[in-house]
Image (cartoon, coloured by chain):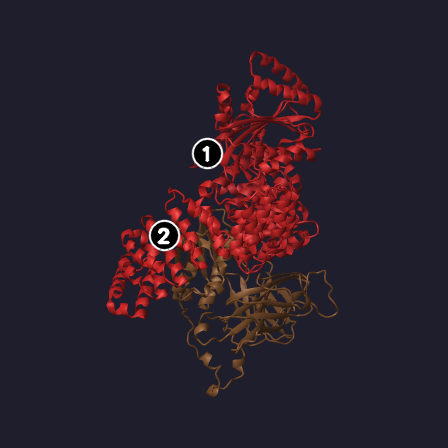
Amino acid sequence: MISQVFILSSQGDHLIYKDFRGEAGSDVVSVFYEKVTALTGDQPPVVMSHGDLHFVHVRQGGLYWVATTTSPGSSPFTIIEFLNRFSALVKDYCGSLSEKSVQMNFALIYELLDEVVDYGYIQTTSSDVLKNFIQTEAVSSKPFSLFDLSNVGFFGAETQQSKVAPSSAASRPIQSSREQGGRSEIFLDVIERMSVVIGSKGVVLKADVEGEVRVKCFMPSCSEMRIGLNEEFSIGKSQLRGYGAAVRVDECRFHQNVHLDEFHSNRVLRLCPSQGEQTVMQYQLSDDLPSAPPFRLFPTIERDSGGRLLMYLKLRCDLPSKRFVVISALSQELSSPDQSAELKLQNRAIDWKIPRFIGGTQLSALFKTSSPPPHPSPPPPPVGPVVLVFELPQLTVSGLQIRFLRLSPVQPAPSQRWIRYVTHSDSYILRL
Amino acid sequence: MPYLGSEDAVRELRRALSNPNVQSDQLRYRNTVLKAIRAMSQGVDVSDLFSEMVKACATVDIVQKKLVYVFLCSYATLNPELSLLVINTLRKDCQDPNPMVRSLALRNMTNLRLPSLVEYVEQPLAAGLRDRAACVRRVAVLGWAKLHNLQPDAEIDAAVVNELYGLLRDPDPVVMVNCLRALEEILKKEGGVAINKPITHHLLNRLKESDVWGQCEVLRILQRYHPQSEDELFDILSLLDASLVSPHPPVMAATLGLFLGLCSGLPAVSLAALERVRGPLLAACGSTSRETRFTALCHIQLLLRSLPGLMGAHYKRFFCGYAEPAYIKQRKMQVLVELVNDENVAMLLDELKGYCTDVNPETAQAAISAIGRIGRSYSDRCLEILTGLLGLKQEHITSAVVQTMCDLVWVCPQCSDTVCSALEGCEEMLQDSQGRQALLWLLAAYGERVSSAPYTLEGFIDRVRSEASLGVKMELLTTTMRLFLCRPSETQDMLGRLLHYCIEEEMDMCVRDQALLYYRLLHCGIEETHKVLHGQRSDPSLGVLIGRPAEPINQWAYSFNTLEPLRQAGVETEPASRGSPEHVTFDPKPNTDLSDTLNCSQIEKVNLGSDGASGFTCSSAKVLAPLSLSLSPALSPEEFEHLWMQRHAEQGAEKLEEEEEDYVCLEERIQFPAIPPCSPQSLQAAMQLVNIQTLAFTPPHTLPWRVYLYTHTHHAHYGSTLVIGELLYIGEASRRVAAVKKGMEDGDVVEGEQEAGLSGRALVRKDGREEEVEVTLKQQPRDDNALKGFLSILTTVLHTLSSESS
């Protein structure tokens, strides 16, 4: 049972405030902001209390999404999941999630809240139901950009680029498709997050992959969709792996609307996607990755007689040649001109930025700390781990591929289907 | 946040809203309304626009209507008279052919929260219940709940309640769930909606139609249902099995909550359910939303209390990610400490060692104390890491390491050698008061083994004038005194200086009093001083309790899936700290004269035969369901004595009216063969583990042997009570004598009740060869269930202890 819902910007500006039950005054918004900013680093902020009012909040898009409740017996899972779902709905309807977009679309958000929650009880969060009720149109905050024009060829001819969806294509309001003649598009994203720990001797200590298949649908009325996964996809350790490179995951969970009758025979998922974004399948794989981790580091660390630290880092990318964006913390003296590095004293880290990294190649960097250590006597502190933050487009670590994406019956209007793969680093740690 | 010039803005808006030109242009009108709402949500007080907004409500533009309603609902309570004007428009909208308009009008009519409007609302609401469109029915059902809460004292309309019960069979699942919610609120005084067998099965059968939120609600309400037979129970459980592994964490949590509630008498089934949710919970721990991760971690901590081995194989999932916030990292470390075993200890310590040099000092400290906790079972490896960390010469790390060592030595005295050698030279690095206090305590306890101790102390004493922390000064006094006892020649001079400073110059009364106390103590001679000051420096009995026994699920099941686990600072609080020796040395003098009046009253006598113990714990499992014990507010020995004596006096005077009293007294005997060998320390440690505070003991091997203790029980429904109690063991031989003696006394003081009790005891003595402890408990206010629950916890502790020592 939710008493109030409000959205605050990170500076504490009131963006949205709605009271469902009249159990507390609107001054609690300021109380919340005071409390949340007064917390020290190690205090858990998720649930806070003020009198008999409990604040539960999540951070999404740099905003505080807060729900208050008066009953301590409320389920935290439900409230947090609701706030996440609500922010996802706002994202679907407004196109993106930022202070600006929330400010511009506040009328739409009030309308959404009104339909989603009544008297503190969650009614529905399904975009299929909501689309019948939401009347306000989203105001898109996209600035005019010349870059958009570059996609249009001379005299409107189709260029090579127009066949590739720009990365921002999916961040637009779902409602606009209704009026603008419907660019009926479907985006199918396979997103994987890696968390890897590699020990100082190059031994992989931990390697986890959390993946999900996400559908973002802009079709006003969608018929059935069939998604074909790799045929040799298997779940669990017990199943036979065959001869080929099977794609194996430890655990796999599906959205409740997914029909699995063809899954066991042909590895086909059937579903009727609703408008907006939804996660069709989540899977997870630990320890036993099909391939070696994508990056390896060969460090040499020396200290000269003056107590200066010399670090020579060689980073190798073990992937088939493709492009990568790699931003790694730690490390000057770069091997190629388009990299950059800066020392961040606050985090006691060196930020080494590599705009693109070709697979199968090797990059190196040499760093020297020149300030002599303040105390000559104590041994110098150990150098912390190297953390890689990267995004690998067009690649899944687990090997999961989408064989096909079919809509049946075939849509009369030209529909565009995009399949995208990306692997993020959740936490890629290389110990020195 | 009020903006400057808001009055001008409101005036401007009012002019625009009442401008006929604006009103005739739909788009301009809507935009002006929009501006007003924007000002409202930014915190500007726009209540002056109310009458203009009432006019703006009568429009065909639905978007504008919705906006105006947002405004009206926020300000209606400030303008009850003007709100009457809106009702007409709203009632007209309730007749609109468009169901969306009807539901909108109905919802906002009930959201105005004005008791004066109730009479106008009832009729449209009643019609709404029978509307063709499901969306109108959804709103109408909840509308009745809103109406009821507006006038909580009004009589409940039985016809409406009946209709709501009927609508549980509505084809729309949201209407069904809303009916449950509305009935729950309307019938709150009667304990909520009636959950009987047909309703339960109806709800369960339709569970799959609802979305996530509806399922959670239904599962929550079903917790009140008690299946009539075991077959029915298992039918329900197998129906719910799929939800238990639902990919949606709210459904999974609600289902597990229901499982634990239904199976409170079947621990094996509950444990199996916990095993089932391992997968979904682990998945929630890896969720992209960090708040979900945190919630899952907190609940995993709960589960681990009953099933410590649950996550053992998955310890790597709890390794901290680089970018995770500090509060998640700390929870993960708390979980990691629980998961440690012989196979993974090397990996785990390696990982934790990496966190010790974290940029965030709080994370580093948490990692260091986590290593200290593991050190209780794997002391050598952990000490190696800890002494290695001292070599880094970082302020916050050194401080955390010294504090951790201090805690570790208290539990594992065998570590003291390593700790003593590591202590040399770290006082320069200690800047914060906790770290210095810990160092001083260590010097006090092991001063004779640290060669540089006097020099370290000298440094402290030289700087005492500029010392800001009260705690450090107090600790410094004690440490110097204790060091003086073992190394008098080196410390005499500095002790004199310190005492002089503290008595003559110190402004703080506590420090001065303490110094005066020590000064006078020294006058009494060295023997006396030694007796007073020579406290314990370790508590090895805690070491035995490291591998804690699994708690019954009932201990935490009531708080599962509530906000409570997320609010606690951490489930794993230290069971004992260095502060405890004071309690152990507390002299139980005031209680010696209590013994003669002890068994004057009793309300309940439960005799446990030689095989009764196991039966008792089984039956109590149901009773004790949601019971938790805590030590706060603390009870001082004086207060305890006062309460204990007071109860006796009252009982003597009015023992006939015991039933009316707000407290209760209970006597019980528990088989406990291991009293004589059981050391007070281990007993105290064991009691503290379950949050029972022992206040006083007689020394072991003396007869009669007594322990006085207290605790507070907290019950989810009945509030909290204070329980004070006494354990009495008079020994085999002396008991016989005592019984005979008392029997004789009873002849004089005629008390039928006690006669019965005594004969009961005599019986037990005849057939039971085992020794027994008499437990006398007093409770205030009276709560039989809590008392029984407490008794069973106590019984379990005593049995655990006796099995361990034998």
Q: What shade does chain B have?
A: red
Residue A40 visible at all: no
The relative height of residue B739 versus residue A256 in the rendered view (above or below) is above
The relative height of residue B424 versus residue B704 in the rendered view (above or below) is below
Secondary structure beneath label 2: helix
B92 relative position to B592: left or right: left
* Protein chain holding label 2: B
The relative height of residue A370 versus residue B168 in the rendered view (above or below) is below
The chain painted brown is: A
- The residue singled out by tag 2 in the image is B123
The answer to which of B639 and B788 lies nearer the viewer is B788
Q: Residues within 10 Å of mark 2 (few under 14, many from 20)?
A: few
Q: Residue at x 58, y 76 (%)?
A: A336
The quadrant of the picture occupied by the C terminus of chain B is top right
Q: CA distance from mark 1 to mark 2?
A: 77 Å
The answer to which of A154 and B63 lies nearer the viewer is B63
Foreground: disc 1 or disc 2: 2
Report x, y in % for residue B363. Answer: 55, 53
Asked if marks 1 and 2 touch (Cβ < 8 Å), the reply is no
Report x, y in % for residue B576. Answer: 58, 39
The quadrant of the picture occupied by the N terminus of chain B is bottom left
Residue B733 location, quadrant: top right
Q: Mark 2: which amino acid?
A: Gln
- The residue singled out by tag 1 in the image is B512
Secondary structure beneath label 1: helix
Residue A294 location, quadrant: bottom right
In primary-sequence order, the first of circles 1 and 2 is 2
* Protein chain holding label 1: B
Q: Mark 1: which amino acid?
A: Arg
Report x, y in % for residue B494. Answer: 53, 37
